[in-house]
Amino acid sequence: MAEHNLAIIGGDGIGPEVIDEGKKVLDYLAANTPGLTFNYTEFPWGSAYYRETGRMMPEDGLDQVSANEAILFGAVGDPDIPDHITLQGLLLPMRRAYDQGVCVRPAYLHPGVTSPLAGKSAGGIDLVIFRENTEGEYAPVGGRLYPGTPHETVMQTNVFTRRGTERIIRAAFEYCVRRNRRMKVTSVTKSNAQAFGMVFWDEVFQVVAADYPQVETESLLVDRVAMDLVRWPEDFDVMVASNLFADIISDIAAVVTGSMGLAPSANINPEREYPSMFEPVHGAAFDITGKGIANPLATISAVAMMLDHLGEAESSRKVDAAVVRSLQERKVMTPDLGGTATTSQVGDEVVRLLWEG
């Protein structure tokens, strides 16, 4: 018998809408897989909670969530609350407190999906981005001196540790070997301008690469990568980058493979001492919140990644196969993919395809 305790945080905007469809898939699996059980603990945190309490989550929120194996997360953000408050109050504290240092963001051009780039065929774009997730440019190190005066001074400090840098780079190489596709790892930096943190990153990349002589390597500046992702995305296999750079290039990768609504993400605590977190890459999407047209497939694909992490490989495979088939058949598509279906209808279609097997 496999029983898994999951924390569910719908969060803001379309987050609760797409999380409902992820739960719909989990509920189907639990009802149709002997011995498989999911226990949910739902946490109503986010911007609405902030308006009531002045906090994005309670003071002991991290302790409350830590008892679970994994977290299924929707989105965070509010048009009337500064982004640094919403992000630093909920999502980033979990990534750091639970040492979720390895963020995995796949991008694949599926059959039935049209890339905005001309001449790209299904399977032609197939890459995975590894994002350092707990330090780098997002480390909360810095401050403001003499605010509101002509002498106001602001400092924001990037933080790169050998442990964090080597961990994410090694994770990218290990995945590349297991993936066994093009056997190529691209490191994304800006070491021509950032002569301390990024040069250090380059040095660690070279040290780790020496342990994987069978893997081709390249180190590219982030501006070059931004160009190449929209010129020749098929050239990339596994990419590894710092917190900020990977955040940016993963959005580009999602768009060139058809839609932000298809991009899942896994925030992994490699030692499994703390829960890992699974979420769609897209944000709260205020412009479509409450309209029932958000694409839930990124969340459902994140559910597949979560199932794999939990050791439920067969269930993970089934969910991935149902997502792929739904895209290929194009019977039930949300507007971002050229359809007219609702969020709930897409979730129902994935469940139907799971039932058909």
Image (spheres, grey):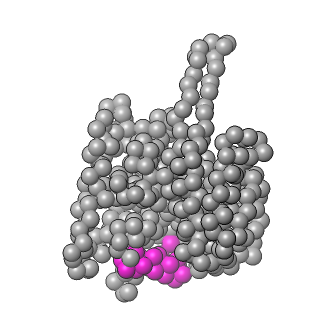
Residues 264 and 314: in front is 314
Magenta stretch encompasses residue 328 = yes
Residue 91 position (above or below residue 104): above
Residues 85 and 187: in front is 187
Among the 4 quarters of the image, the one containing residue 346: bottom left
Q: Residue at x 50, y 67 (%)?
A: 334
Q: Position of residue 43 (x, y in %)?
A: 29, 48
Residue 349 position (above or below residue 252): below
Q: Position of residue 104 (x, y in %)?
A: 52, 61
The answer to whether residue 48 shows anywhere in this view is no
Residue 21 vs residue 103: left or right?
A: left
Q: Residue at x 60, y 31 (%)?
A: 156
Quarter of the figure that contains the C terminus = bottom left
Q: Position of residue 141 (x, y in %)?
A: 54, 32
Residues 300 and 160: in front is 160
The answer to whether residue 3 shows anywhere in this view is yes
Q: Position of residue 100 (x, y in %)?
A: 45, 52
Residues 311 and 90: in front is 311
Residue 67 vs residue 18: left or right?
A: left
Quarter of the figure that contains the N terminus = bottom left
Among the 4 quarters of the image, the one containing residue 344: bottom left
Magenta stretch encompasses residue 344 = no
Which residues, given as a range, are shown in magenta? 314-333
Q: Residue at x 67, y 13 (%)?
A: 150
Q: Residue at x 55, y 69 (%)?
A: 175
